[in-house]
């Protein structure tokens, strides 16, 4: 007999015993877990702790969004800080309210545009519509059109800038569709690519044109980081005109609320203004150079129009704010006039005046919101007096600010609301500060 045979047999027997003990323990554990699940008891297993994947379709239109937890809510550092819209995956570059103030659209570098429904902005939960941009496109700016359901989105990719118009497909009414909570997803109605060559779009601005023979349609201005500004018809996507600021480099462009004027802030002390001329059929006929604002001593960094479109507020690196009357007979060489001016009331730790990056005027024209870095200020537009300040409004630079065009419900009352976006992946909603009547 082979002397190794007993050793081999003994090894096989020991291996079988060990295997029996291991698998026996495993099956007893599985049986115990099955019995525990049947009784509704928790199973102490790592796999069971993994959150289940949502069963809702990725194409569902409105999703519920909850505000920060109570613990985070208690961290609010400012009394005007009303709400924070979270859920963005990257820096938020722009935002826009619909004309009724009930919707807020945001442009996020994560490739998604979100439309929030603001039934009551003090609520702890709300719905938002998620629109995924075409692959490789990062949204940088957004604007609503006149119907409050269509939006224009500016994007940036490796090949340059693009703009898209999204609108809902209106399904035929039926008893079944009336019962459905989900509405059809917006679809691309028109698109343009490389609209400013390979230059990025700094901002887009929309205005419902109601001046002269204009028919109320939205015109959109897209401002490139170079010197070019293009004007578009919102619904059709038709290019209405192109202007060159010839001012080294643009900071931003804006349209007057009535759609009559277009103004640009650039790396010079002067602000150029163009008038948009409308034909009898309501369409844009031409865009003509109208006037120039001369009075600052250094580059104008930002500007905004008043609600009546007759005035412009400018901020400059010379440390001043100026309010201009542009309702002049410029055809007869009448120059725009400076109505008032005041120093920018924002300084660094050494006392040096800081310049503003964004301006936005409240719908009633009384409160001017302004930003520098992560600091947000509210000023009285008549006197330049500081009404309030949030020194760390965002955890990083503020990228855009805008007021809702109407007072919105906040609990049992209404208030003007300012929206701000930042590189910290957040959009914040702020109450208007109180203005003393004295």
Image (cartoon, rainbow, N blue to C red):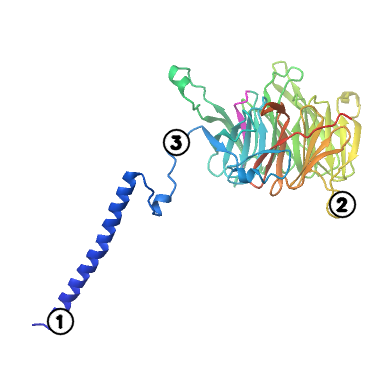
Report how far apart the C-alphas of labels 3 and 1 lie in the structure: 65 Å
Report how far apart the C-alphas of labels 2 and 1 lie in the structure: 93 Å
Residue 273's place in the image compared with 10, above or below, is above
Residue in the foreground of this view, choosing between 420 and 407: 407
The answer to if 72 sits in the magenta stretch is: no
Q: Which residue is mark 3?
A: 57
Report how far apart the C-alphas of labels 3 and 2 lie in the structure: 54 Å
Q: Which residue is mark 2?
A: 352
Q: Which residues are magenta?
A: 147-156
Q: Which residue is mark 1?
A: 4
Q: Position of residue 215 (x, y in %)?
A: 69, 18
The C terminus, quarter of image: top right
Label whose residue precedes the other's in the sequence (3 or 2): 3
Q: Secondary structure at mark 2?
A: loop
- Mark 3: give few (<14), some (14-19) or many (20+) Cα within 10 Å: few
Residue drawn at (75%, 39%) of the image: 252
Residue 334's place in the image compared with 398, above or below, is above
């Amino acid at each position: 007999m082979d002397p190794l045979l007993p050793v081999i047999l003994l090894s096989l027997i020991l291996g079988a015993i060990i295997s029996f003990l291991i698998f026996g323990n495993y099956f007893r554990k599985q049986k115990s877990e099955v019995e525990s699940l049947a009784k509704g008891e928790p199973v102490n297993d790592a796999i069971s702790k993994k959150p289940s994947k949502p069963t809702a379709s990725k194409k569902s239109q409105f999703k519920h969004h909850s505000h920060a937890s109570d613990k985070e809510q208690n961290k609010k550092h400012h009394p005007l800080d009303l709400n924070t819209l979270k859920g963005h995956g990257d820096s938020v570059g722009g935002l826009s309210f619909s004309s009724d103030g009930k919707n807020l659209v945001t442009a996020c570098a994560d490739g998604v545009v979100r439309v929030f429904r603001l039934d009551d902005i003090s609520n702890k939960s709300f719905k938002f519509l998620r629109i995924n941009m075409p692959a490789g496109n990062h949204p940088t700016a957004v604007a609503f059109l006149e119907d409050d359901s269509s939006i224009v989105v500016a994007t940036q990719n490796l090949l340059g800038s693009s703009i898209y118009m999204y609108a809902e497909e209106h399904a035929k009414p039926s008893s079944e569709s009336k019962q459905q909570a989900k509405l059809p997803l917006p679809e691309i109605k028109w698109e343009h690519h490389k609209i400013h060559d390979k230059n990025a779009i700094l901002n887009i601005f929309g205005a419902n044109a109601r001046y002269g023979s204009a028919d109320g349609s939205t015109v959109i201005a897209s401002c490139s980081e170079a010197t070019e500004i293009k004007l578009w018809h919102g619904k059709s996507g038709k290019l209405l005109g192109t202007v060159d600021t010839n001012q080294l480099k643009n900071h931003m462009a804006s349209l007057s609320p009535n759609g009559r004027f277009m103004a640009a802030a650039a790396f010079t002390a002067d602000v150029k203004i163009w008038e948009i001329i409308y034909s009898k059929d309501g369409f844009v006929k031409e865009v003509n150079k109208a006037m120039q604002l001369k009075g600052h001593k250094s580059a104008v960094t930002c500007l905004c129009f008043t609600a009546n479109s007759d005035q412009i507020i400018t901020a400059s690196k010379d440390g001043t704010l100026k309010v201009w009357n542009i309702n002049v007979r410029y055809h007869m060489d009448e120059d725009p006039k400076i109505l008032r001016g005041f120093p920018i009331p924002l300084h660094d730790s050494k006392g040096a005046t800081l310049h503003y990056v964004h301006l936005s005027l409240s719908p009633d024209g009384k409160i001017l919101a302004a930003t520098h870095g992560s600091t947000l200020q509210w000023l009285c537009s008549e006197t330049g007096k500081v009404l309030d300040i949030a020194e760390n409004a965002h955890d990083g630079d503020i990228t855009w600010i805008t007021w809702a065009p109407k007072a919105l419900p906040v609990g049992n009352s209404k208030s003007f609301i300012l929206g701000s976006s930042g590189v910290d992946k957040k959009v914040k909603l702020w109450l208007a500060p109180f203005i003393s009547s004295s």
